[in-house]
Image (spheres, helix red, strand yellow):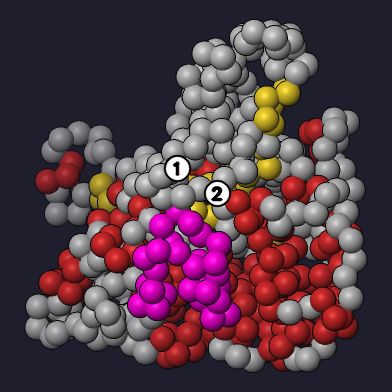
Amino acid sequence: MKKLLNIAFVSAIVWIAAGCSQGWLDETPPHLITAETLYTNLDGFEAGLNGLYSLVRREREAVNGASNNLTAMIATVGTDNLVAHNSAYIGSITQNWKSLNVSTNSGLSGVFLWLYKIVNAANTIINRAESGTEVDWTGGGATPEQNKNRVIAEAKALRAWAYRHLTFCWGDVPMSLEEAQGSDIKTDWERTPRAEVRNQIKADWLFAEQYLSAEPAIRGKISKGAVQHYLSELYLTIGKPDSALYWADQCINTPAYKLITERYGVKSNEPGSAFMDMFYEGNSNREEGNTEALWVWQWEYNVVGGGGSLMRREYSNTNFNSQIKIGGIAPLQYTVERGGRGIARALPSQWAINLYEPGDVRGSNDAIRTYYILKDAIQNAPGEADRLPSGYNYGDTVKLDWSEDLVYTTKSSRNDWPFIRKWDNTISADLQASLQYNDQVYLRLAETYLLKAEAQFKQGNNTGAAETLNIIRRRAQAHEISAADVTLDFILDERSRELITEEHRRYTLIRTGKWLERVQAHNFAGGNQTATARDTLYPIPQVVIDANLTKEMPQNPGF
């Protein structure tokens, strides 16, 4: 499987081992890579882009290398549908906003600095490509001008992606469009108004949309459709539903993009649903049949540049071995089918599990683990037989329990709690591995339909919004709705049913003005007790404020 190279190049000098010790003492050492030596041809820019993508993928990897600190939690946990559980770092903030959402939190500073590494890596590529310095842009089956514009478009799209995170998390943030170099270290940064930063985000994405293709030539790269999707979300964020609808339709009406409505791929002959097919290894990529994917992120086991994701570790529960006991017996064994070992740093709220009507495939046991079937060694395919408690037989059901909600301090550790199965993936060589190595859908067309429905609703077109929502609901085998059913809350509920653990739920609720209301109504793992209006933003990290030596950087209100 072709993978993006894992080359991190972020304005710093990167050393490659020299052929002999004397070589790197020369005035012009041949094995020293700098921006000046790297960005001279298309291959050099591709290497820089690969490093940029490897930084971006850290969203589903660890902050600061801590295996219990999933970067994505900055945008997913502490909402109405996903609550912290046995959590640490960023997740633990959402259990006690008052005490832990503070400027000295290392998880927050790690995310903030990670995003600015992306910004600077993107700036370096953009500035070098636009500098007018002679570059050999030939190669890749395109014209030099096409190659140049595509490289700049990818870098601008990812810069805008980073600033999207920054503005939703911190509001007004320092904005830089220039490559940072050791000779021009700034100590007088100012926070740029969020509206101004979003204007730059818009400009970057509008440029990128012109020069990116619907089908990127290399797996893992951002597509035209993903940029159109983000433009639709941005216009909803700034209160322009007409423009949001335009860009959603641009994406939806692209012939290459289609919802998955029929079974396909590696498990198509097994019980299941078209909805879940796109999350299985071997089905995620577009060339594997996933026409719904707008952006797919790449990982692979034991391959240079492959790496691993933390999604299963953080979002799957620990329902194995010593964790669930029946009559003193822990029956369940680790298997590939069961997805390996989870840690459950975040779990769906009781409200989120109960959102699904009977028959909605998104709430089935294929999509949300609510029970296990006891299996013998052959059925565990292959593996150890489950241990049978007294009175149980193979084929019997072990049910999970969500009758009482997850409540912080009193029931904060629930190993018998249901969990989302979109990230069930492990390797047979190590069923308890911390990381998973499958390619993953990062952004898909179903969410674009949900943006379209929201835009139609905000235009006052409830009939159109209902029909758009029904396109999603038909695939899920849920009942169809009418115009009278459409409210902002219904759209947010539908987003949860479709996108739980995928979407940046916190950002969705903040941009719709619903975060605090819904956290207080549905999140009993600390959120309803401690969240306040100030927590719609995170505090600027203290290390950033302290580093701004020659100009005061104001903190967010309430911190």
Determine which residue is flagged by label 1.
Answer: 411
* Amino acid on which disc 1 is placed: Lys
Residue 155: percent from left, percent from top: 49, 69
The magenta region covers 509-536
Q: Secondary structure at mark 2?
A: loop
Residue 389: percent from left, percent from top: 62, 10
Q: Is residue 87 shown above or below 449?
A: above
Instruction: Classify residue 257 as left or right of residue 67.
Output: right
Q: Quadrant of the N terminus?
A: top right
- Main SS, magenta region, reads helix
Instruction: Classify residue 295 as left or right of residue 199.
Output: right
Q: In the drawing, what numbered circle is on residue 405?
A: 2
Q: Secondary structure at mark 1?
A: loop
Q: Earlier in the sequence, mark 1 or mark 2?
A: 2
Taking the spot 83% from the left edge, 49% from the top edge, the residue there is 358
* Amino acid on which disc 2 is placed: Asp
Residue 344: percent from left, percent from top: 48, 40
Name the image quarter holding residue 11: bottom left
Q: Is residue 483 visible?
A: yes
Instruction: Classify residue 74 as left or right of residue 360.
Output: left
Taking the spot 49% from the left edge, 89% from the top edge, the residue there is 199
How many tags in the picture?
A: 2
| Residue in the foreground of this view, choosing between 108 and 118 | 108
Q: Does the magenta-highlighted stretch encompass residue 518?
A: yes
| Marks 1,2: beta carbons within 8 A | yes
| Residue in the foreground of this view, choosing between 31 and 482 | 482
Q: Is residue 114 visible?
A: no
Q: Residues within 10 Å of mark 2 (few under 14, many from 20)?
A: some
Q: Quadrant of the C terminus?
A: bottom left
Taking the spot 41% from the left edge, 50% from the top edge, the residue there is 408
Q: Is residue 14 shown above or below 142?
A: above
Taking the spot 67% from the left edge, 37% from the top edge, the residue there is 369
